[in-house]
Image: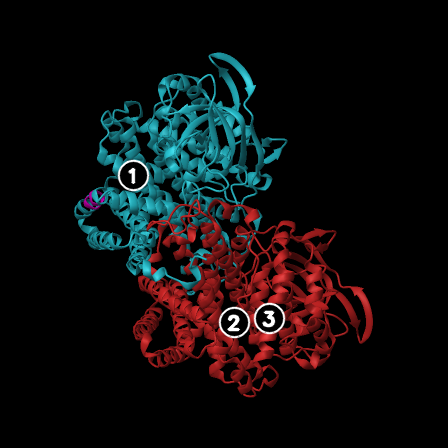
Chain colours: A cyan, B red
Amino acid sequence: MPQYQAPLNDFEFILHDWLKLTDHYQAIGAQDAADQSLVNAILNEAAKFSETLLSPINYSGDQQSSQLNNGLVTTPSGFKDAYQQYCDAGWSSLACNPEFGGQGLPFSLSAAVAEMVAGANASWSMFPGLTHGAISALENHANESLQAQYLPQLISGQWSGTMCLTEAHCGSDLGLLKTRATPSKDGEYVINGSKIFISAGEHDLAENIIHFVLARVDGAPEGTAGISLFLVPKMLTVISGKSVQSDNQVECSSIEHKMGIKASPTCVLNFDNSRGYLIGELNQGLSCMFTMMNKARLATGIQGYAIAELAKQASLTYASERLQMRAISGAKMPQKPADPIIVHADIKRMLFTQKAIVEGCRGLAMYVATLVDKIELSQQPSSDIESRLGLLTPICKAFMSETGFEACNLAIQIYGGHGYIQESEIEQLVRDVRITSIYEGTNGIQALDLLGRKVLKDKFHSVNQWLTEIKIATENSDEKFVNYAHQLLDYCSQWQTINQNLAQKVSQNPDEISAAAFDYLMFCGYVSVAHIFLQQANSLQHSSQSESFKQDKLQLLNFYFLRLLPRATYHQTVINAGAESLNCEAFQLK
Amino acid sequence: MPQYQAPLNDFEFILHDWLKLTDHYQAIGAQDAADQSLVNAILNEAAKFSETLLSPINYSGDQQSSQLNNGLVTTPSGFKDAYQQYCDAGWSSLACNPEFGGQGLPFSLSAAVAEMVAGANASWSMFPGLTHGAISALENHANESLQAQYLPQLISGQWSGTMCLTEAHCGSDLGLLKTRATPSKDGEYVINGSKIFISAGEHDLAENIIHFVLARVDGAPEGTAGISLFLVPKMLTVISGKSVQSDNQVECSSIEHKMGIKASPTCVLNFDNSRGYLIGELNQGLSCMFTMMNKARLATGIQGYAIAELAKQASLTYASERLQMRAISGAKMPQKPADPIIVHADIKRMLFTQKAIVEGCRGLAMYVATLVDKIELSQQPSSDIESRLGLLTPICKAFMSETGFEACNLAIQIYGGHGYIQESEIEQLVRDVRITSIYEGTNGIQALDLLGRKVLKDKFHSVNQWLTEIKIATENSDEKFVNYAHQLLDYCSQWQTINQNLAQKVSQNPDEISAAAFDYLMFCGYVSVAHIFLQQANSLQHSSQSESFKQDKLQLLNFYFLRLLPRATYHQTVINAGAESLNCEAFQLK
């Protein structure tokens, strides 16, 4: 039975030895966080919380699932108690605005905490996770009155939040949405419509649920230009300045039976003349949503490799204990009836793949989280940092969910038949992680966003800056990594060649974007992680981690360059294949 | 809701136009089958059976699962009725020995039928599937008396069979097994022990269940050299020549809660002084099992891509109907609120990948099935054919289950959020197909079998023959395929280079086998399927299929060479990385 253990050594190495987090916090003016021992104390407490409260209710949560009865959702045993303790300990308010009761710590710290929470219990992590999006929407777009009314309780966790975008006939294409907002006499709105796939849309953890709903005001333009964002509370607590406590007619009519994250209720919500408050400008709903997208998408990528961390830990334990056959090169534990399966190179191949995925993604995610810090906390956030974040976010979301799924799936293979049995608690991880490639924008949408908007529409500005940074850092690598550096510089050249070719192709046929996008994203992911690993290797010499930890990282670097990075070359080949290779009689429109 | 449709056009093209099945049947003396209209009639009837009886109970079977009560297993609604109709229509006896009531048709025909059955309902296909292994064991290794007693009812389907190998502490490593066989006074054996993961170990479809049990006779040598095979019926019907009807004390104490194939009961069976009959020679149990391995492993590979066929069909339908966004190159269906998602190149990429996997695997599987025909029906089966079958079997099992899983998983992605919901009946396919990479020997075991035994121990005899055949066929390809032919010949040279390098490396470190095995198998799979596609393309000119079918196959050839075959190059790179790249501090034995 996998018991989650927070990877504290790797966090400390990444955050302190490599990213030099406290210097970074100092530089952006986050003085409170610029104390290594405080950072470590927070990491340690988050580890304890995840290991002792969340991990033990992960499997039982899957078995029990959330249940709907008469419009009310009951979460599995232990979920409510863990949520209460999470709020009491101040985890919900960690990186939130002190003006409304938050602790004002940097996002990167909360990203590390979020990884632990998601790794220990992905379903449970959905409840606080969704509230963060609601907080961002309020902070960035709501008027002062709404902020004062809603932010303190959302930040404390007393209330939770949702994002209500999808409808039955529209997911990726929000321009088609039909939920209506009608102006009411007192200047607010009346919301009518039905939303699906609403995570944590109804549950018993918080006293109130604040829905952020995309809807179309009567007479608004067609398509995405006519969508506005509304705050719609489950319970109304204030109307026209007076305290009330009244039901706002938001009904949860059903919850989905899903492949995984079964403890997280995915709701159909019906808004029946529900009172709504406009957030931001009229018809600017989509752009209000987009401001919170980067963090939400990064968080989804983090979920992807976080679940893989648990799969990796369980696999390593199982492979070290399961006795089966002898090593081909002769018995390694002759005193036992067979050797543990970890002696087989093929098992090591799978374990190492998991390890490289998890540690590579973690490095990339934490680096990207420091970009968010810079934007959120610097007095003058630079537009280069913003576009760097915009560039790397879809890569994080899609690459980490794709490879996180691969790592979880390898765990089943390492467990063999036992991994296919629910009681081993392994197949759950594959079912849980599978959603991360879909929600917050499918990976196909991420790839289009990357290649179409962040690369081509940006005229290569941001991607070239990223490539330049990789090249300079690589050229300055320690002498002993010269072989890796040469390889990485080669990949950078290939990346530039790909960009040039694509620019030309796309100018002739815009479908070339979609034909290349997914493989382009994966190429960028593999090469970016190679850069992360090489830079981490450079920072080992000043690390206070153990010698075996350092040895391990060097072996990981070598493994990655020899066995995973070459996938980038495959993706490059596919990018070159172009749109024409996707024509097929069978796919003609009828 | 995916409704299975048997791919009859592709079967007809593969079996008649490409493999020239009736000539092949004639050549091996299977005159009865050498009638194209009879073959087509059988395919059509199998299609009808699969589409109308098995497909409709696939999802309900997953939802209901098989249930255990007081030692008895109840299968989901409709399973028993479908089984009765399967037996009544003679499907169970199709390729069985006429001496015992079988119809004596070639295996290849039953392989095509097996694909349809597994594609329509993978769980249900386990019941007749396991019986085939039991029949093989009896036919090849039992004495005449046992054959006469058990074969007719197994062939008619009145009784079903199982394979009882795994115990809690041994799966891949059967040498560790502990189930005991004690000689009884009348010359038979008394079996005691416990087996796990027994598919169809207990159920309500057949009147009796005949277990084939690996056990260790008292005093037998340790390890695999001391394992014997026993027939242990659930109900004894004859003792010392007298008819009886008595319970043989085989108890099903629990069934597993699995990730998928939930309608197929996976049983823990306890043998408590159960009467057993020795099959084959004492201590030759493993080699008795191995004679039936090739067919069982091929059948597992077939399951892998058969389930993917259903995923592919459902994906194509969904992508043609789901309206979402416009094509990047401009609206394709301006009269509708959005274009169907199939207009996007990224969706086509996924659909084409599914199509290439399914049709490539089908071609390879059907070719390999004709090798089985030659061995089973020829008067003088050649040892070259036997070793060709031995070489290609692990490739089929592992390559088809790996890529079949990929194709099913893409279906979830094409469906987006809806694919993650159980009611879409898509995520079930991923859960069902996942077992095919594990049972009948994990894909890691298949890879070791391929590289260790079938290539290296065989001193490249068989693999070089296969390569020669590919090369000759490729060189004789139609002029218009010259580009593909050149590429394929290149891959063949690479394959030979890989072989030479591995021979040298392994002589210095036997762990190099395990370090390379999985990627070696995948390399072989991709290149072998390329050969299949090219040869199929060559046979198009004499095909009676429609022009659009032919066009489709040519586009598939092009897609495969440009976008999937390059994966072989990636696997080659990984093979070259060698065992040293798998060393890791974290994987040291403690």
Mark 2 and mark 1 in contact? Answer it, CB < 8 Å: no
Chain of the residue displaying label 2: B
Q: Amino acid at mark 1?
A: Gly
Give the Cα separation between the discs numbered 2 and 1.
49 Å
* Mark 3, other Cα within 10 Å: few <14 / some 14–19 / many ≥20: some
Q: Which picture quadrant has residue B103?
A: bottom right
Closer to us: B274 or B223: B274
Give the Cα separation between the discs numbered 3 and 2.
10 Å
* Mark 1, other Cα within 10 Å: few <14 / some 14–19 / many ≥20: many
Q: Residues in magenta?
A: A464-468
User: Whole-percent x and y of residue A415?
Assistant: 50, 54
Q: Which residue is mark 2?
A: B11
Q: Which residue is mark 1?
A: A390
Q: Marks 2 and 1: same chain?
A: no
Mark 3 and mark 1 in contact? Answer it, CB < 8 Å: no
Q: Amino acid at mark 2?
A: Phe
Q: Which picture quadrant has residue A379?
A: top left
Asked if residue A467 lies in the magenta stretch, the reply is: yes
Secondary structure, mark 2, is helix
**B342 relative to A73, above or below:** below
Task: Identify the disc placed on residue B44.
Answer: 3
